[in-house]
Amino acid sequence: MDRVKTLLQQTLSDWQSWSDTSETSSSITTAPVVIEELRGGRTNRSFLVNAGPLQAVVRINAEHSHNLGIDRHRESDILSLLQQTGRVPKIFFITNHVLVCEFIAGRHWTTEDIESNVNSEKISQLINTIQAIPLPKDTKKRCYVDYCQHYIQQLPVSFQEEQRSVINVLESVAQEVDQSSWEPVISHHDLIPENLIETEQGLFLLDWEYADYGHPAIDFVRLYGGDYSHPISGKVLLLQQGIDELWSVLQD
């Protein structure tokens, strides 16, 4: 049996260990049954399951999560902090290998949705709510130079040599962002339309595996590019684009 099937079966068999960490408890009293595999993810495998009246998503994490800069302990900590917002899925079970969370039924946003003035206000309010969450004492903010280096060091030497000028620019920009004056906030770092879902209860933000205590402009720049007004928005945009490119190379 392959790794994904083994972890899926283990997680379903251990369903009595699932619990709702949100303030509004959902009763999990029935063994879950797989309905279908959810398609679309590039790194993980996810399955929709029914547990009585409850629908949940079982995500089997990719084996190479660390290579992509993902820290599952940090993801768990951030998701715990975010439960109070009511705008992220409820978490039922989480380990280094598996996440079980509430299935959010609704409509995923598109690029056109983000360009709407009304929707821009919705997502801006949601980001501001998230950024206002107090962080634990002595929270260590993301070092973007280290994050870029983590990606760069995995690239083939030949690619590094061919792209040396581009890499040098990225490292320089990351250093400028790190050395600028800013306080960390919870940052999603992967705020693409597909991770935004509109429901009757409001707008939800999904998929927090790349989240960290990051720069307050980076999620806004991801959404609005150079149109976002911030003293170093141009540098943050170059940083975001460079990280995206490195991620794509590693995925390929």
Image (cartoon, rainbow, N blue to C red):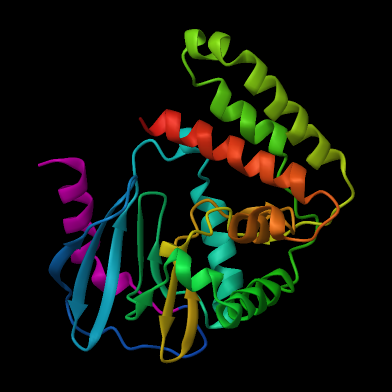
Please determine whether, in this image, residue 27 is positioned above or below residue 152: below
Was residue 39 drawn as part of the magenta stretch in this picture? Answer: no
Highlighted magenta segment, given as a residue range: 1-20
Residue found at x 66% / y 79%: 125
59 or 229: nearer the viewer: 229
Dominant secondary structure of the residues highlighted in magenta in the image: helix
Q: Nearer the viewer, residue 92 or 191?
A: 191
Q: Is residue 206 visible?
A: no
At a point 61% along the width and 70% down the height, the residue shown is 81
Residue 123 visible? The answer is: yes
Q: Residue at x 66, y 72 (%)?
A: 130
Can you say whether 227 is above or below 145 in the image? below
Q: Is residue 185 left or right of residue 152?
A: right
Which image quarter: residue 148? top right
Q: Nearer the viewer, residue 63 or 161?
A: 161
The C terminus - image quarter: top left
Q: How many marks?
A: 0
Residue 185, percent across and down? 73, 61
